[in-house]
Each structure stands twice: as C-alpha cells, then as structure tokens.
Image: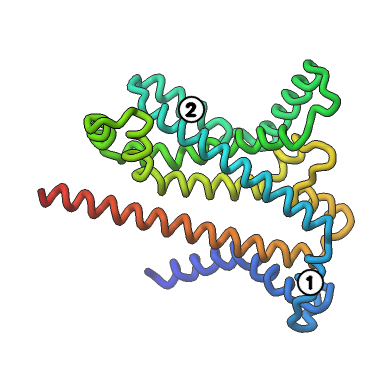
Amino acid sequence: MKLSAKIYTGIILAFLFAPIVVMLIYSFNEAKSLSVYSGFSLRWYKELLRDRNTLNAVKNTLILAFSAMAISTIMGTAAAVGINKIRRRWYRTVMNTVTDIPMTNPDIITGISLMLMFVFMGRLFGAANSLSFWTMLIAHVTFCLPYVILQVLPKLQQMDDSLREAAMDLGCPPFKAFIKAELPEIMPGIITGAIMAFTMSLDDFVISHFTAGAGFETLPIRIYSMTKKTVTPEMYALATIIFFVTMSLLIISNLVDNDDNRRLKESKKKQKEK
C-alpha cells in the first residue's frame, strides 16, 4: 500500500472513531466538564446504576429489541424460504423489491405512515390509546424483517437442494426435513440476521418516536428528551457499555460468517476431489 493510501485510510479511520474515543475517555472522567479531564473515575457508572428512569428505559429497550429480534427472525426465515422456492423470475423480482422497501424508505416516512395506520385502526376499533408497546413492536418487526431475509436468503441459495430431497427420501416429512437438513445449513445466516435485527431495534429512534405510546420510553427517546436540557455524563457511561456490547455482537457475527465460509470452501474442495 502506498504512503498516500495509508495516510488517507488513517484520516478516514480517525474521522470515524475519534468521537467514540472521546466518549470513552470522558465516561471515565471524574469531573462533569467536557473541557477538563480531572482524572480516572467510575463515578458516572455508579451514578448510572442509581438512575432508575434511565435503567427503566434500558429495560424497555432490551425487551423491545429481543421481542422484535425473535419475531422478525422467525418470520424472516420463513419468508426467505418461501422466496427461495419461487421459480418465476418476475415474481421473485417483485418480492425482492417489496422486501427492500422498508430499508430504502426514509425512517421518517416509515414512522409517520405507521403512526397514521395505527391511529386509524385504533379509532376504527374504538381503542382508548392507539399507540402502545405493541404498536412499537409491530413497527420494529416491520423494519427488521428485511435484514433477516437478506441474510438467510443467500444461505438458502448456496445450499445444495439435494439435502432436503435426500432427507424426504429417507422418510422425513417436509417440516422435519427442513429442521434436520436445511436449518443447520442456513443457521449462520439466521444468527447474523438475528444480531442485525437486535442492533437495528436497539438503535432506532425515528420510528420509535412516532409509534411509541405513553408510559413506554426507550433509551433513544430518553436521550433525545435529555438533549432539550443537558446530557449528563451518565449517558457517556451507558453509551460506552452499549458500544462494547455492539462490538461483541459484531465480532460474533463475523466469526459465524468466517466459519461458514470456511466450511463452504472445504465442502467445495471435497466435491472437486471427488
């Protein structure tokens, strides 16, 4: 690599990670000021553990993220299996386009349209409160689904179709053949899709803001409400914890993908040797 390329890469990395480094450093700052670093301290992590409102927002966020991850993973896997079985090219193109819409559509448009739909349905059925945890969960599943589908579908396309046929020839019914033969092969894609769905749900603010009901506050919404006054260093501590959790999930996802690619290469190598 040329020196100019190294310098350019270093500048880009510094631009991307400098804010995160500053946040990490000042989460351990004894003082509240961002202009003075008075010494290493775990003060703000201790304060975070005493902040019941923030901890409640974290709990709500995790409940929502895990619920959205579980539902979208099951539905997304089933949808990917269905799309993979479509033989008409134009029909598959339509389904892929429909799948991509929640990802390419601006979040604010998705949030407003979902809010209007929920309010309309609530008034139609005479509900006292149109927006609640359940509306937010439906919204999160809506935008998490495409990420699961796009992770599982390539694994299905890479898989040898004869595996399922062989399992059925040996007496397995269709569903059992899927569980025994296909599911282990596409599991890396399912795991990666589930991790992406979890992180997307954990991070979302715009759609959550429009579909949240009274009494259910997620962490992004709470942080946004704090910006109207001031963001305390407790948030730096919490953001640091979330950063390391996200990094751990990213490492797990990459390890799963690398292991799956290694197994795929070994399988192709054995087939060539035969």
What residue is disc 1 on? Answer: 46
Q: Which residue type carries mark 1?
A: Lys
Residue drawn at x 30%, y 40% as measured from the top left: 159
In which quarter of the view is residue 24 placed? bottom right
Residue drawn at x 50%, y 40% as measured from the top left: 148
- For mark 2, give the secondary structure: helix
What colouring method underlies this structural image? rainbow
Q: Can you give x and y, in whole percent of width and height, for residue 130 in the image?
A: 80, 27
The 10 Å Cα crowd at callout 1, few under 14, some 14 to 19, many 20 or more, is: few
Q: Is residue 118 left or right of residue 87?
A: right
Residue drawn at x 41%, y 55% as measured from the top left: 256
Total of numbered circles in the picture? 2
Q: Earlier in the sequence, mark 2 or mark 1?
A: 1
In which quarter of the view is residue 1 placed? bottom left
What residue is disc 2 on? Answer: 97
Numbered mark located on residue 202 in the image: none
Residue drawn at x 70%, y 49% as measured from the top left: 61
Q: Which residue type carries mark 2?
A: Thr
The 10 Å Cα crowd at callout 2, few under 14, some 14 to 19, many 20 or more, is: few
Q: Image height check: is 207 above or below 25?
A: above
Q: Can you give x and y, in whole percent of width and height, for residue 224 in the image?
A: 80, 50
Q: Can you give x and y, in whole percent of width and height, for residue 213 in the image?
A: 80, 36
